[in-house]
Image (cartoon, helix red, strand yellow):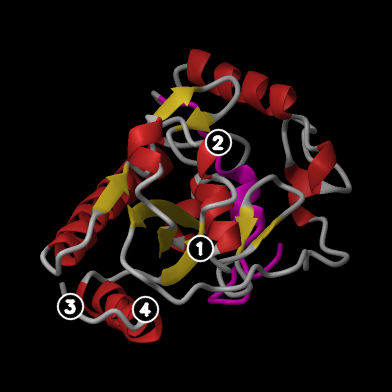
Amino acid sequence: MERQDPLSNYEMLKKYSIDFLGLDLFGVADIRAIRDKFLLPEHLVKRYDYAISFGKEVLLSVLDDIQEAPTLLYFHHYRQLNAFLDRAALQLASFITARGYLALPVAASQVIDWKNQKAHVSHKKVGELAGLGWLGRNNLLVNPELGSRFRLVTVLTNLPLKTNNPIPFSCGDCHRCLTVCPAQAIKETPADFDHLACFEKLKEFRNRGLVGQYICGICVKACYGRKNYLSEK
C-alpha cells in the first residue's frame, strides 16, 4: 500500500481525474452515514467509507436542440456521457486498486427502479455530500458553474481521503426550471418536487417514440449555470 495521508491521496486522485481522465467535477464524500441505503450487498458496502463523485459537462450546443421534448441528438449525447463516465470510473478504480486499496465503480446510469428513480447508489446524494452542488428545485444537483448540466458517476473506496463539504441551497430567486417544466413537477422547494408527475411525463415522451429511454432535458437546459451560458430569449 502507498501513502496513507488523506490530503495527499485526495490531491493525487483529483489531478489524475481532471488532468488525465478529462473530468470536469471531482469531490469526495464520507458515506458512512448513508451507505446502509445503498442497494448493494451489505458485505460489499461495509468495506467502503468514502465515495468519489465526479462529473462531465453536458454540452450547451446539444441542449440547444431541445425545445419542448427530448431529442435524438440529446439522447445520443446522454448515452455517450454515461459511457465516458463508466470508463473513467473503471480507470480510477484500477488506479486505486494498483495502490493496494479497494475501489468499486458504480455505473453512471443503471437504474433498478425507474418509477422511484432507484439505482445501486444515489449519485446525486453522493455528489451533494461531496460538495459538487446543492439539491435544486428541479430535483437535480446544481453546481455553481455548470448548473444542472452534468452527468455523475461514483467510485466507492477504502483509500483514506480528505472529504469535501456540502454546498447550501443557493437557487435564490431563480425559477427558470419551474416555469419550463412540461410536467409542472417542479415546485418552490426541492422537498415538494412531484416525482410521479415527472415520471409520467418521461413515460409519455418514451411512448411517443421520441427517444428510447426515460429522459427529458428541459429543466437541465434551463439550469445552465455561470459557465458559457446561453443568452435568454
- What is the secondary structure assignment of the residue under circle 4? helix
For the record, the magenta segment spans 213-233
* Mark 4 vs 2: CB contact within 8 A: no
Between marks 3 and 4, how big is the CA–CA gap? 13 Å
Disc ID at residue 2: 3
Mark 2 vs 3, N-terminal side: 3
Can you tell which of label 3 and label 4 is closer to the viewer? 3
- What is the secondary structure assignment of the residue under circle 1? strand
Q: Amino acid at mark 3?
A: Glu
**Magenta part mainly helix, strand or loop?**
loop
Q: Which residue is mark 2?
A: 37
Q: Which residue is mark 4?
A: 10
Mark 4 vs 1, N-terminal side: 4
Between marks 4 and 2, how big is the CA–CA gap? 25 Å
Mark 4 vs 2, N-terminal side: 4
- What is the secondary structure assignment of the residue under circle 3? loop
Disc ID at residue 68: none
